[in-house]
Amino acid sequence: MADKLTLTLKFPFKTAAGVQLNSVSIKRLKRKDISSAQSATKDEGVMEDMLIAKMFGITLEDLGEFDIADSKSATEVLREMSSGGDLAAVLGRSAAAGAEVAALGNSPA
């Protein structure tokens, strides 16, 4: 199982609950999460916010307190996830060493 990914905030802040938020864990979203957001609103910006909040396990209120730089990073993570890309690369981390070896092992000779 892959290591749990987190987004470290460039500009940490205190949440509405008074907790210092320095980083957020990233949870992979499911089709049901998209359906839920689509049934709640037709506004694509609000849908994106709902999905990002769900992905990080935070409230919309706390997401609203993200610095613009952290907000941009959050959007990049969501878009990379939706395209099936490498989240570790977006987060500035290298992929696991084993992944490269496994990929090489599956290459035709």
Image (cartoon, rainbow, N blue to C red):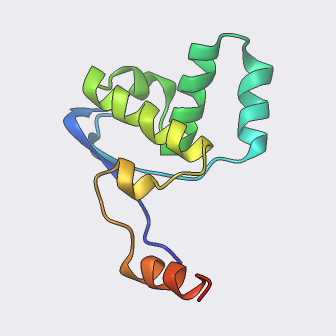
Q: Is residue 79 visible?
A: yes
Residue 61 as seen in the image, left or right of residue 65:
right
Residue furthest out toward the top: 43
Image side of residue 23 versus residue 55, left or right: left
Decide: is 88 above or below 106.
above
Image coordinates of residue 5 in percent, x first then y, are: 41, 59
| Residue sitting at the far left | 11
Asked whether residue 16 is in view, the answer is no
Task: Left or right? Give the position of 1 relative to 3.
Answer: right
Q: Tell me how many marks there are.
A: 0
Residue at point 78%, 42% (across, down)? 32
Classify the position of the C terminus by image quarter: bottom right
Residue 9 is situated, as x and y percent measured from the top left of the image, at 25, 40
Query: Residue most toward the front?
Result: 109
Measured along the vertical axis of the image, is residue 49 above or below residue 93? above
Q: Quadrant of residue 36?
A: top right
Q: Residue at x 60, y 51 (%)?
A: 84
Give the answer, above or below, for where 87 lies relative to 56.
below
Query: Residue 82, image x and y in percent?
Result: 61, 42
Residue at 38% from the left image edge and 68% from the top image edge: 95
Residue 26 in the image, given as x and y percentages of width and height: 47, 51
